[in-house]
Image (cartoon, rainbow, N blue to C red):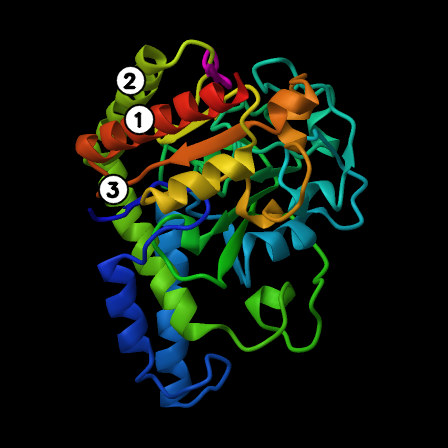
Amino acid sequence: MARAYLDWNATTPVRAEARAAMIAAMDVVGNPSSVHAEGRAAKALVERARAQVAAAMGADGADIVFVGSATEGAALACAGRGLHCAEVEHDAVTSWCVPDLAVDAQGRVAVPEAAISALQLANSETGVLQDLPQGLAVSDLTQAFGKVPLAFNWLGCDAGLVSAHKLGGPKGVGAVALRRGVDLPAQIKGGGQEMGRRAGTENLIGIAGFGAAAEAAARDLANGVWDEIGQFRNILEKALSALTKDTIFVGKDAARLPNTLCLIAPGWKGETQVMQMDLAGFAVSAGSACSSGKVRASRVLRAMGVEEELAASAIRISIGPGVTEEMVLRFAESWAKHYDRHRARRG
């Protein structure tokens, strides 16, 4: 039986539109900083992608700075600003901020001073969505971009972080949207590329793929693709509830991404679940892909007040376009069968 990829929050398959744009960009010889015809042709590709990403983000009029990843974008947006955040943020943000903001049991964050705070729009592990206050310094939009309606210009924050490979683009390229007038010092210095905010010759091929993927993702969102995905997530949650008695669904009472389900199977280690499901033909995760291999309970769940033993028994299922109702029901049946075997062994 064919494998089912249910780890879309870690990374997504490359869209056909992005692949075509990258192949075409390979034939463009010029350096985007050169003034001759070849250079201008390369620059035109970068600017087209910049416009595509801006339109998909609802960031027309903002500055879109291309970077190597959302992690690099976090360094550009957060470094040296003395910002505060919560422990539910990605490591890329907590590395530059003081993680002292309060988190409730549903994963929602209280922000007393928006101007000196960073707050994600959606959590990668739980899918929990935040209500962003106006005047926020930085928001990690990486998981929300392309999955829920988003208008950077209406968020009222200084900077927003996004990544291509979370919405069908290539790995190794991201962007920072900056409210017009916000000036951040470059973290990578050298030439004057990207409006002086990120030195280095632009990743022309990756940027072209990012632009095409962003445009296609916006089209999917407008056409209701993610509404159907949300229905499949709910079907999965209902099926698992019917098949097991003690499963805990994290953030169930909060607004969540339509594709994300974080569950806890008490006493069954998340890493073990991931391995057993992998052998059964399903790709899921025990949390953020960037934190894989770290033998400890999820920092996000611990921040939500989940006890360490329970937090260590969590997995994340995240789905996307192409995942079918049959796939999620097949996963539910297989997962429940393995969980029953685990409990029987434990007595």
Which amino acid type corresponds to the residue marked 2 in the rendered image? Ala
Q: Position of residue 302 (x, y in %)?
A: 68, 24
Q: CA distance from mark 3 to mark 1?
A: 18 Å
Q: Position of residue 226 (x, y in %)?
A: 27, 33
Q: Which residue is mark 2?
A: 239
Q: Earlier in the sequence, mark 3 or mark 1?
A: 3
Q: Residue at x 63, y 74 (%)?
A: 192
- Magenta part of the chain: 247-254
Q: Is residue 284 visible?
A: no
Which mark, residue 321?
3
Q: Residue at x 39, y 81 (%)?
A: 40
Q: CA distance from mark 3 to mark 2?
A: 20 Å
Q: CA distance from mark 2 to mark 1?
A: 6 Å
Mark 3 vs mark 2, foreground winner is 2
Name the residue nearer the viewer: 251 or 317: 317
In the drawing, does residue 326 fall left or right of residue 142?
Answer: left
User: Marks 2 and 1: CB-CB under 8 Å?
Assistant: yes
Q: Residue at x 70, y 62 (%)?
A: 186
Which amino acid type corresponds to the residue marked 3 in the rendered image? Pro
Which amino acid type corresponds to the residue marked 1 in the rendered image? Ala
Q: Are there few (<14), some (14-19), or many (20+) residues within 10 Å of tag 2? A: some
Name the residue nearer the viewer: 32 or 255: 255
